[in-house]
Image (tube, rainbow, N blue to C red):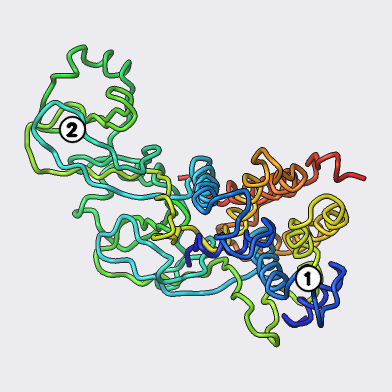
């Protein structure tokens, strides 16, 4: 069962004193979606809420490969049958000063800090094209929108998202600000977030 | 307590005439009661269900939610009446660095959860495999007036405490001040239930126990000074 962002917004309307998104006085619907997405992805960054897999197709060249769009951190990479260790750029320097141009039949390591936050490098670079490496990773959620409101979250996190989004809305500067509500929302969110961390903090 | 009784009590405590509410609506009370039972079951893991999970041949990650839509966390998984041991991908790697290779497929003996909903069985199954699961579940949402929450009956009144806090988020300070006491009561009832569930989990050798971190956090919480009157 997923969390429906339109249902979250619908239940945010009473505490925001609106009967529909059309008569929200101090917020826009887009802001509420942004608050909801921030809530979900704050949690996704704190624990292993979203675990996915992707396949990297070898290209027989030395260049790095694109990471999945929603990638946050690697859990495992399997290349040529075996799990391979993640290695820093400094580690590659120590192993092989010429690592940027080294190619071989078998991939032995991978690195995430050599070519920017959205790239992964396989070491040595494969000489054989079209084989694949399997990347298992911790990810974030795609943004919920009015056209695509379903969030791949367990239904028990509906309240976490609701309170966090409410707190963010009530923190907004201006006549609509109600810092007391924002503060309580933050406490409730922390309590629910702590339970989530215990459930999903490991890989 | 029935859904109707819970809604009526929430409206009454919010200062409304439940038969003719003016500031708070019946729909708001209904949403708040459902929210309360959702939070209670999440914090305590007091609701359980079972489902057969089909793991396809060679699957490394299998999404659970289509087979168990209200899934929160695994309690006990079995294959042919043998318990599968919980683990992690790091443990699987140390046991067999080539475990994902098709040549290594066999009957699963362990499992790991990757994220909230993807299950990884070790070894990957050589044939489509059905794993029997017992899991912590979210409650069925209350819709009709005669429905009763699935959580234990003696905990039903606590739902009103949480619901009241959620409803008073519409007003802010003074009503929320009053409702915060109710939140503390709600969390105290949840803690008692959590302790019972934890004892049972240990006795039954369940793989997931309810979180205690939230209660520690709640005890040390610095509630906003304007709400501490």
Q: What residue lies at 61% left-to-right and 53% top-to-bottom? A: A160
Query: In which quadrant will I find the C terminus of chain B?
Result: top right
Q: Quadrant of residue B94?
A: top left
Tell whether A141 sits left or right of A168.
Answer: left
Q: Nearer the viewer, residue B70 or B131?
A: B70
Residue A71 placed where, x, y %?
36, 41
Q: Could you classify mark 1 by the number of other residues whose Cα lies within 10 Å: few (under 14), some (14-19), or many (20 or more)? A: some
Residue A151 visible to an observer of this rendering? yes
Q: Residue furthest right?
A: B229
Total labels drawn: 2
Q: What residue lies at 44% left-to-right and 54% top-to-bottom? A: A144
Q: Secondary structure at mark 2?
A: loop
Q: Nearer the viewer, residue B48 or A66?
A: A66
Residue A136 placed where, x, y %?
33, 45
Quick check: B70 above or below B43?
below
Q: What residue lies at 75% left-to-right and 65% top-to-bottom? A: B163
Q: Could you classify mark 2 by the number of other residues whose Cα lies within 10 Å: few (under 14), some (14-19), or many (20 or more)? A: many
Residue position for label 1: B155
Residue B109 placed where, x, y %?
39, 59
Q: What residue lies at 40% left-to-right and 45% top-to-bottom? A: A139
Q: Are marks 1 and 2 in contact (CB under 8 Å)?
A: no
Q: Nearer the viewer, residue B34 or A21?
A: A21
Residue position for label 2: A107
Residue B149 placed where, x, y %?
69, 77
Query: In which quadrant will I find the N terminus of chain B?
Result: bottom right
Tell whether B121 sits left or right of B51.
Answer: left
Q: Quadrant of residue A156?
A: bottom right
Residue B213 visible to an observer of this rendering? no
Q: Residue furthest bottom?
A: B146
Q: Say which chain tag 1 marks.
A: B
Q: Quadrant of residue A43?
A: top right
Q: Secondary structure at mark 1?
A: helix
């Amino acid at each position: 069962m997923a969390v429906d962002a339109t249902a979250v917004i619908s239940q945010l309307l009473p505490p925001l004193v609106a009967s529909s998104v059309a008569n929200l006085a101090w917020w826009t619907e887009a802001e509420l979606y942004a608050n909801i997405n921030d809530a979900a992805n704050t949690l996704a960054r704190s624990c292993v809420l979203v675990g996915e897999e992707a396949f990297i197709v070898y290209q027989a060249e030395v260049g790095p490969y694109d990471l999945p769009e929603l990638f946050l951190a690697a859990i495992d990479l399997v290349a040529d049958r075996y799990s391979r260790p993640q290695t820093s750029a400094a580690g590659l320097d120590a192993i092989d000063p010429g690592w940027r141009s080294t190619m071989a039949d078998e991939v032995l390591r991978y690195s995430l800090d050599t070519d920017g936050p959205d790239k992964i490098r396989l070491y040595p670079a494969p000489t054989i094209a079209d084989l694949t490496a399997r990347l298992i990773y911790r990810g974030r959620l795609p943004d919920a929108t009015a056209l695509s409101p379903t969030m791949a979250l367990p239904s028990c996190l509906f309240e976490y998202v609701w309170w966090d989004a409410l707190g963010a809305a009530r923190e907004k500067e201006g006549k609509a600000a109600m810092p007391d509500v924002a503060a309580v929302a933050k406490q409730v969110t922390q309590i629910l977030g702590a339970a989530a961390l215990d459930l999903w903090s490991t890989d | 307590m029935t859904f109707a009784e819970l809604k009526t009590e929430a409206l009454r405590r919010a200062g409304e005439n439940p038969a003719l509410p003016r500031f708070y609506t019946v729909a708001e009370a209904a949403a708040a009661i459902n929210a309360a039972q959702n939070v209670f079951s999440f914090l305590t893991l007091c609701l359980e269900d079972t489902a057969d999970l089909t793991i396809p041949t060679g699957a490394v990650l299998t999404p659970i939610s289509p087979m168990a839509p209200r899934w929160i966390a695994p309690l006990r998984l079995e294959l042919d009446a043998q318990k599968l041991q919980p683990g992690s991908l790091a443990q699987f790697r140390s046991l067999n660095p080539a475990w994902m290779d098709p040549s290594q497929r066999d009957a699963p003996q362990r499992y790991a959860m990757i994220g909230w909903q993807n299950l990884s069985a070790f070894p990957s199954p050589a044939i489509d495999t059905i794993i029997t699961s017992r899991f912590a579940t979210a409650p069925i949402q209350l819709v009709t007036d005669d429905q009763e929450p699935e959580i234990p009956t003696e905990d039903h009144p606590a739902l009103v405490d949480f619901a009241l806090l959620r409803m008073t988020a519409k007003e802010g300070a003074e009503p929320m001040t009053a409702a915060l006491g109710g939140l503390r009561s709600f969390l105290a009832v949840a803690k008692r239930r959590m302790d019972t569930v934890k004892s049972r989990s240990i006795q039954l050798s369940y793989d997931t126990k309810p979180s205690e971190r939230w209660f520690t956090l709640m005890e040390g919480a610095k509630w906003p000074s304007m709400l501490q009157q």
